[in-house]
Image: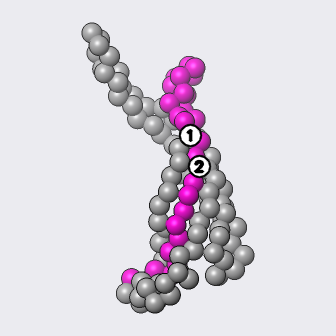
Amino acid sequence: MFVLFRLVLSERQWLVPYVGGGWTRIYYREKIESQSTARGYADGNFAKVGIQILLDGMDPSSANSLYLDYGVEHTYLFFEVRKTTAKLDDTVYDLGGVGLLAGLLFEF
């Protein structure tokens, strides 16, 4: 579960910055030599910041075809940094970390 805030000022804005955050659950399983396997989960939270790049203007005819065939309003390439914190049973062990993500976003 998360919330995301995008700074959209116009329909054809080609760079859209965003921030977000929310709740997460991390599942883990660790095989320890000469011991039983440790497994479980930890609840935590995350924060993220990123940028979305509008791709519609690069090939308007393909963007129009995506809209007519599938209802895709806009296509974005996004880059994101995410910081996750998930402590294991109120100990010093944090299962979170920092992640870098990239992908495509299709807005219907």
Q: How many marks?
A: 2
Query: Magenta residues?
Result: 70-98
Q: Are marks 2 and 1 in contact (CB under 8 Å)?
A: yes
Q: Secondary structure at mark 1?
A: strand
Q: Quadrant of residue 11?
A: bottom right
Residue drawn at 47 percent across, 65 percent down = 104
Q: Is residue 72 above or below residue 4?
A: below
Left or right: residue 7 versus residue 68 is right
Residue drawn at 51 percent across, 25 percent down = 88
Residue drawn at 47 percent across, 39 percent down = 25
Colour mode? one colour
Residue drawn at 49 percent across, 84 percent down = 59
Q: Residue furthest right?
A: 9
What percent of the width, then of the height, locates residue 15?
Answer: 65, 70
Residue 95 on the magenta span? yes
What percent of the width, then of the height, locates residue 30?
Answer: 35, 24
What percent of the width, then of the height, locates residue 32?
Answer: 32, 16
Residue 37 on the magenta span? no
Q: CA distance from mark 2 to mark 1?
A: 7 Å
Left or right: residue 68 versus residue 35 is right
Residue 23 in sight from this viewpoint:
no
Front residue of 56 and 11: 56
Amino acid type, residue under disc 2 in the picture: Val
Residue 17 in sight from this viewpoint:
yes
Q: Residues within 10 Å of mark 2 (few under 14, many from 20)?
A: some
Left or right: residue 66 versus residue 13 is left
The tag earlier along the polypeptide, 2 or 1, is 2
Using the image, tell me which numbered label, if any, was put on residue 81. 2
Residue annotated with mark 1: 98
